[in-house]
Amino acid sequence: AEPLLRVDDLKVHFPIEGGMLLRKQVGSIRAVDGVSLTVNRGETLGLVGESGCGKSTTGLAIMRMLTPTGGRIAFEGQDITAYDKAQMRPLRRRMQMVYQDPYGSLNPRMKVRDLIGEPLVVHGLASDRRAYEDKIASLMRTVGLLPAMADRYPHEFSGGQRQRIGIARALALEPSLIICDEPVSALDVSIQAQVVNVFVDLQQRLGLAYVFIAHDLAVVRHVSDRIAVMYLGRIVEIAKRDTLYRSPQHPYTQALLAAVPVADPVVEASRSRAIVSGEVPSATKPPPGCAFHTRCPHAFARCRTELPALRDLGDGQAVACHLDEANG
Ligand code: SF4
Ligand code: MG
């Protein structure tokens, strides 16, 4: 069957302008540089990588809040790559986004009722007052908030509750896909699991699909069916969830996995907070060859000159690395 979302060779390059008087382009930031992925109905694709790897930009491009500089995006079978605002409008009901910052993404002057109901108003689905109020109460209950709190303002809620408000708002139009951009990263660790469980529970009840963006492999483990690992604008490994944790093939995935927090708080406290040692190179001037070679413990001569292609290993796993290519 046709996947819900299909992204082929997506590129988002931002121009860098230079010169004091002449606004001429002196380079480009290759934020996303050839990403291909699919998401099926009711499925969660985890999208993981350090900040600056292009995962949020990929999400914004899928939402068509950014215009891709190359590639193709198809949603529910329609090629939306070149859609303008008016063409995207009916599709906004089907694809929604939940943002990282539950503090900054909600208008502080709006009551919860209006925050959750705004998408319904914008799409002309609020004509019957009674049905509208019922819908808001039901959305609040769906995400575990008391409908009696509908007249409160965002500042009266905790971070976790605010993120529930953001989720209820995203659910109002009954989307088939939600792009979740690090939706728990700004929350206290103690409540991250609760909010992740809200996502999992909603998926089971409503059959939603998610692209679930995170900067480490700990958060996505519980929600994802498949996981794609990004490094400097490209997917370096993609696999089914269990395969990725059991048998990671890319050295970067292996490093991310080694950084996943362990349950023992004593061991955890002694760990470095850095996910992988070494600086992430600039996306303005990505290293030639394999972009990970400046930090890879296994790098050899070929890695510095030749870009490894994403190689299919079977059973949904693919890796972009020159290691073991002969046996692969
Ligand atoms: Fe490391 Fe080379 Fe593989 Fe890149 S291609 S991840 S540098 S071994
Ligand atoms: Mg981001």
Image (cartoon, rainbow, N blue to C red):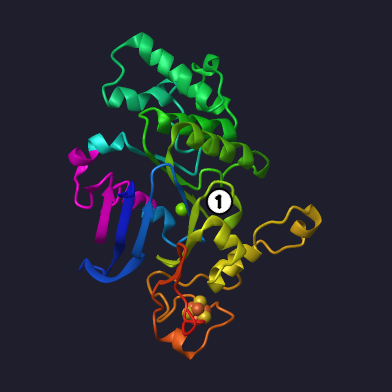
Q: Residue at x 55, y 62 (%)?
A: 244
Question: What range is drawn magenta here?
Answer: 59-88
Residue ID at (25%, 57%)? 72
Can you tell which quarter of the image residue 7 is in? Answer: bottom left
Could you tell me which secondary element the residue under label 1 belongs to?
helix
> Residue 165's spot in the image, x, y percent?
49, 29
Judged from this view, the residue extending furthest toward the top is: 130
Report which residue position mark 1 lands on. Answer: 220
| Residue 15 coordinates in the image, percent (x, y) | 28, 65
Q: Report the residue that reaches farthest toward the right.
A: 266
Residue in front for this viewpoint, 20 or 294: 294
Tell me, yes or no, if residue 293 can be seen here: no
* For residue 196, above or below residue 242: above
**Amino acid type indicated by mark 1:** Val
Picture layout, residue 15 above or below residue 208? below
Instruction: State the image quarter where residue 190 is shown.
Output: top right
At a point 45% along the width and 32% down the height, the residue shown is 206
Identify which residue is drawn at 57% across, 27% down.
157
Q: Is residue 19 left or right of residue 232?
A: left
Judge the density around disc 1: few (<14), some (14-19), many (≥20) Cα neighbours within 10 Å: many
**Residue 278: % across, % down:** 58, 73
- Eyeballing the image, is 300 above or below 282? below
Q: Is residue 209 left or right of residue 18?
A: right
Q: Position of residue 14 (x, y in %)?
A: 30, 62
Number of numbered markers:
1
